[in-house]
Amino acid sequence: MKVYWLGLLSGKYIPNKYAYKSIPGGQNISPAIQWGDVPQGTKSFAYSIVDHTAGASNTIHWFVVNVPHSVREIPERASGTREKMPAGALEIRNSFGELGYGGPNLPRNSGPHEYILAVYALNVENLSRGPFSTAEECEREMRGKVIASATVSGIFRR
């Protein structure tokens, strides 16, 4: 499986417009993502954007489950919209306590942070989760159901 985020190659810088509104230039716009080379038997997808930098405590910036198997991309600005999010997809609360996308929100002088976008191909149509579920609960339910996954990273620095 392959995944593309913002049209960037892995390890490139994330533009400020995708950052949380407290960051100068931040608009908290959810990024466009695409994936392909999907394995047979895929019935749905899940994806997440997580800050894996030491000290960031694996901050969840976006976690979505129950994305239909026919979907191969999420357009920019999709989070929180019925028009752009796939029917049936469920946005889970991020580490800021909000439903949907929450962009990078770094303290000053914290250095560059690495954000990992992971897309998971699942062998089930839906996870039995609601919007108040945690990412950890979703990850537990996904165990044994992931057929394939792919990741790409982006770097953000304030």
Image (tube, rainbow, N blue to C red):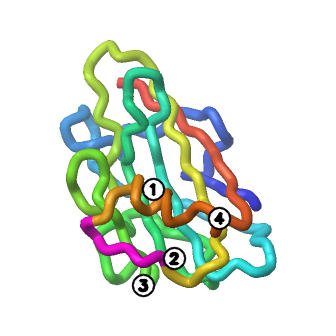
Amino acid residing under circle 4: Gly
Secondary structure at numbered mark 2? strand
Circle 3: is it few (<14), some (14-19), or many (20+) Cα within 10 Å? few
Q: Residue at x 49, y 57 (%)?
A: 139
Where's residue 84, x and y in %?
A: 40, 77
Q: Any mark on residue 144, and which? A: 4
101 versus 20 height, above or below = below
- Specify whether 52 is left or right of 149: left
Q: Residue at x 28, y 38 (%)?
A: 25
Q: Any mark on residue 67, and which? A: 2
Circle 4: is it few (<14), some (14-19), or many (20+) Cα within 10 Å? few
- Of the two numbered discs 3 and 1 on the same chain, state the one appearing first in sequence: 1
- Of the two numbered discs 3 and 4 on the same chain, state the one appearing first in sequence: 3
Asked if labels 3 and 2 touch by Cβ distance under 8 angstroms, the answer is yes
Amino acid residing under circle 3: Gly
Q: For residue 128, what is the image quadrant?
A: bottom left
Read off the residue under disc 3.
88
Q: Any mark on residue 127, and which? A: none
Give the prevailing secondary structure in the magenta stretch: loop
- Of the two numbered discs 2 and 1 on the same chain, state the one appearing first in sequence: 1
62 inside magenta stretch: no
Outermost residue toward the top?
109
Q: Any mark on residue 31, and which? A: 1
**Range of residues picked out in magenta:** 127-132
Amino acid residing under circle 1: Pro
